[in-house]
Image (spheres, grey):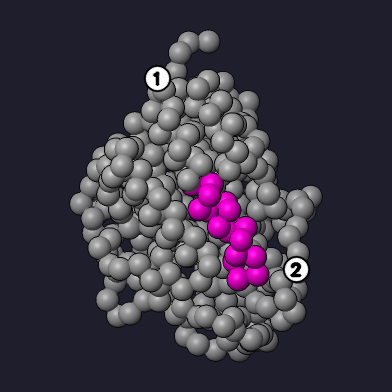
């Protein structure tokens, strides 16, 4: 087996975004070694990577990103050139119920990984941290740019903002070559049903109503997963170290409108019957109505979303229709409180 030109470590590579990134890297760069470090919790499925699991340039390591000994062994044995850090807990509702676990994985896990990268004899030449638009807090009329203040409004967003500060500190103190991305809601095939689009699809496929939290006019900007992956790979090659880049879409969808659209696509009912498939449930205490962000800084590097909402949601619905048993044998987390609807995030 010949030597690989580059070794890339992806944490959380069996999750939704991570698995798409891993598949893109493995298939698009056969001369790179791709290492996927994942603990395989309930939101991950080994099935997500079946198309690449036998490739010579793919290695899977099951383990905890908070384990310093494991990380030291990985960096020592494989001479990691690039890190994509995606391993995180991301469910907003769960972050209120168990904030300590979000602090452990999202903050302490990031610190442990940064420390291992910094002390490695062969230090990575790029460390990309995948963050979220939620660190900006509730949106106003003006879109947030990368210089906007961070005002995270839930425990998940707080943990991501704290992790960002750690990432920056390793750039300032050790010149570890970091890049931070803040993304809109990313959607597409293989996303777990704790997120709003697969949650609605799962309910409808089981002949249940879409449960919508509250009556406030919440909306989200949605970006198809392949466009997000293209942004990450572009930043790997052209992004400036020490910088933050928003990765966003101009397509904003009201959550109520999203539910109505999916009802029509899945249940094939006329407009007059759509309301029969909707149920409003109590809202969570803290409600963020929208997260508008500007991606002009990224666009100047040549990036632009290629997949329209119409095409992306069509592909997504079709995949869930064809793979209804994808998560059937996965362990599940405790059920949400009685009456809880899906998160809007």
- What's the CA distance linking mark 1 and mark 2? 45 Å
Looking at the rendered structure, the number of numbered marks drawn on it comes to 2
Q: Residue 38's spot in the image, x, y percent?
A: 61, 40
- The image shows residue 226, relative to residue 286, as above or below, that is above
Instruction: Tell me if label 1 and label 2 are in contact, CB under 8 Å.
Output: no
Instruction: Report which residue position mark 1 lands on.
Output: 5
Q: Can residue 25 be seen at all in this image of the molecule?
A: no
Residue at point 68%, 49% (across, down): 41
Dominant secondary structure of the magenta stretch?
Answer: helix
In the rendered image, residue 320 lying in the magenta stretch gets the answer no
Q: Residue furthest left?
A: 300
Q: Nearer the viewer, residue 185 or 116?
A: 116
Q: Residue 70's spot in the image, x, y percent?
A: 59, 31
Q: Secondary structure at mark 2?
A: loop
Residue at point 43%, 69% (across, down): 152
Q: Nearer the viewer, residue 57 or 134?
A: 134
Residue at point 65%, 85% (across, down): 281
Q: Secondary structure at mark 1?
A: loop
Horizontal side of 196 relative to 310 (left or right) equals right
Horizontal side of 211 relative to 140 (left or right) equals right
Residue at point 65%, 77% (across, down): 341
Horizontal side of 252 relative to 86 (left or right) equals left
Instruction: Report which residue position mark 2 lands on.
Output: 335
Q: Can residue 15 be seen at all in this image of the molecule?
A: yes
Q: Which mark is residue 95?
A: none
Q: Nearer the viewer, residue 88 or 261?
A: 88
In front: label 1 or label 2: 2
State which region is magenta. Answer: 95-110
Earlier sequence position, callout 1 versus callout 2 = 1
Q: Residue 72's spot in the image, x, y percent?
A: 53, 29
- The image shows residue 116, relative to residue 56, as above or below, that is below
- The image shows residue 290, relative to residue 42, as above or below, that is below
């Amino acid at each position: 087996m010949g030597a690989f030109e580059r070794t890339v470590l992806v944490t959380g590579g069996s999750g939704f975004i991570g698995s798409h990134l891993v598949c893109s890297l493995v298939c698009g760069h056969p001369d790179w070694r791709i290492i996927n470090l994942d603990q395989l919790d309930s939101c991950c499925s080994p099935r997500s990577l079946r198309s690449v699991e036998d490739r010579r340039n793919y290695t899977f390591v099951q383990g905890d990103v908070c384990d310093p000994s494991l990380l030291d062994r990985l960096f020592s044995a494989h001479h990691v050139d690039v890190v994509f850090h995606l391993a995180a807990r991301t469910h907003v509702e769960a972050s209120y119920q168990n904030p300590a676990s979000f602090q452990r994985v999202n903050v302490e896990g990031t610190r442990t990984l940064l420390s291992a990268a910094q002390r490695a004899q062969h230090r990575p030449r790029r460390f990309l941290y995948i963050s979220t638009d939620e660190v900006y807090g509730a949106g106003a009329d003006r879109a947030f740019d990368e210089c906007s203040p961070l005002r995270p409004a839930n425990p998940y967003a707080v943990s991501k903002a704290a992790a960002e500060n750690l990432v920056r500190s390793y750039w300032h103190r050790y010149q570890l070559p970091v890049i931070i991305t803040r993304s809109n809601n990313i959607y597409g095939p293989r996303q777990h049903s704790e997120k709003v689009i697969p949650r609605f699809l799962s309910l409808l496929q089981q002949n249940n109503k879409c449960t919508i939290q509250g009556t406030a006019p919440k909306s989200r900007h949605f970006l198809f997963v392949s466009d997000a992956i293209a942004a990450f790979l572009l930043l790997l090659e052209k992004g400036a170290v020490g910088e933050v880049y928003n990765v966003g879409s101009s397509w904003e969808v009201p959550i109520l409108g999203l539910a109505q659209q999916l009802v029509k696509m899945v249940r094939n009912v006329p407009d007059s019957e759509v309301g029969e498939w909707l149920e409003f449930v109590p809202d969570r205490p803290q409600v963020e109505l929208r997260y508008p962000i500007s991606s002009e800084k990224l666009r100047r590097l040549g990036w632009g979303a290629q997949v329209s909402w119409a095409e992306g949601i069509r592909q997504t619905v079709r995949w869930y229709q064809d793979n209804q048993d994808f998560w059937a044998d996965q362990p599940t987390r405790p059920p949400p409180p009685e009456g809880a609807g899906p998160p809007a995030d």
